[in-house]
Image (tube, helix red, strand yellow):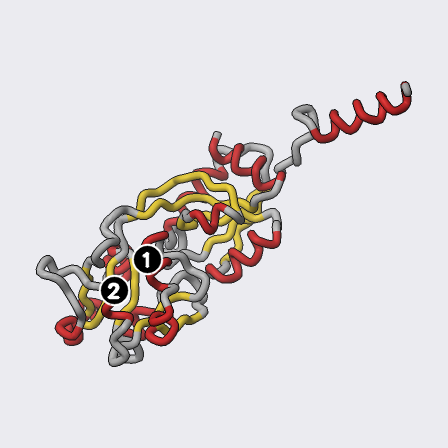
Amino acid sequence: MLREIWVAAAALLCTGPLAAQPVVDHITWLAGDTVASRGPRGARPSDRLIDWVSARLPGITHERVIANAKRSWMLIERGDQVCHAAAVRSAQREELAYFSNTWLMPPLQLITRRDRAAALPVDAAGRVDLIALLADSRLQGVVVQGRSYGPTLDAQLQQPAAQVALRRVTAGDFGSNLLPMLLQGRADYALEFPNVLAAQAQGQPEVAELAMLPIRGAMEPVISGVACPRTLWGQAAIRRIDA
């Protein structure tokens, strides 16, 4: 009987509140968001965030790896000891990761060439009806495989019509190759944050040929932040980052 009590007590210590938490002494940061400024440093918003956070996490070695959206979420889902530095938050992703909110991003815009804007279905306020657009087989959209565009748009982009209307590409980042595709006439429209378009316009006068249009039903800001895998290590890491 005494032995059974001892075994039960030992098991409780190993699984209860006193159980040792994973040591977070190394974080591999996944950074692959679209370049939003010029220069060798701070070229991506995530670079600035990683610089700021890592300087305030003593005792942790920080490694930075460039990974696109598809690969990033494969590593997180697998439970690797990685943290994504610029992840759009959604209920679906919360099943895979713990989050620390860092940014409130402006609403995504529909990007198209100015000479094609008249062909888009818009309401009296100039907002694009994305559902109607996806049903128009004459127009081809392009999005990044594995990237989230926020809960509202993600749901629309998964509709049956979207499977035909959209070309899903695997990009090296979160989609810096999409704007050139629009300019070259290889696609009719894409989705992007307005600040990214403004940043890419610096030194690229051809970007002025593109127009930004608001999307009906997607006028709210998008929550973005740090995501670490939904494991004991990921929970410990996100607590350090939150602090």
Crowding around mark 2 (Cα neighbors within 10 Å: few <14, some 14 to 19, many 20+) is: many
Residue 60 falls in which quadrant of the image?
top right
Front residue of this view, candidates 14 and 6: 6
Q: Is residue 184 visible?
A: no
Local SS, label 2? helix
Front residue of this view, candidates 59 and 187: 187
**89 to the left or right of 141:** right
Q: Are marks 2 and 1 in contact (CB under 8 Å)?
A: yes
Q: Residue 48: image x %, image y %?
A: 40, 45
**216 to the left or right of 23:** left
The kind of residue tagged 2 is: Leu
Q: Residue 63: image x %, image y %?
A: 56, 48
Above or below, 100 against 140 in this view is above
Marks 2 and 1 sit apart, C-alpha to C-alpha, by: 9 Å
Residue 149 falls in which quadrant of the image?
bottom left
Q: Which mark is residue 130?
A: 2
The kind of residue tagged 1 is: Leu
Local SS, label 1? helix
**109 to the left or right of 170:** left
Q: Residue 225: image x %, image y %?
A: 41, 44
Q: Residue at x 84, y 21 (%)?
A: 5
Q: Residue at x 13, y 73 (%)?
A: 118
Pick whichever of labels 2 and 1 is earlier in the sequence.
Answer: 2
Furthest residue toward left: 124
Above or below, 43 against 172 in this view is above
Q: Residue 9: image x %, image y %?
A: 79, 23
Q: Pick the quarter of the image with the N terminus.
A: top right
Front residue of this view, candidates 90 and 44: 90
Above or below, 212 against 25 in this view is below
Crowding around mark 1 (Cα neighbors within 10 Å: few <14, some 14 to 19, many 20+) is: some
Q: Is residue 22 visible?
A: yes
Find disc 1 in the rendering and name its residue: 153
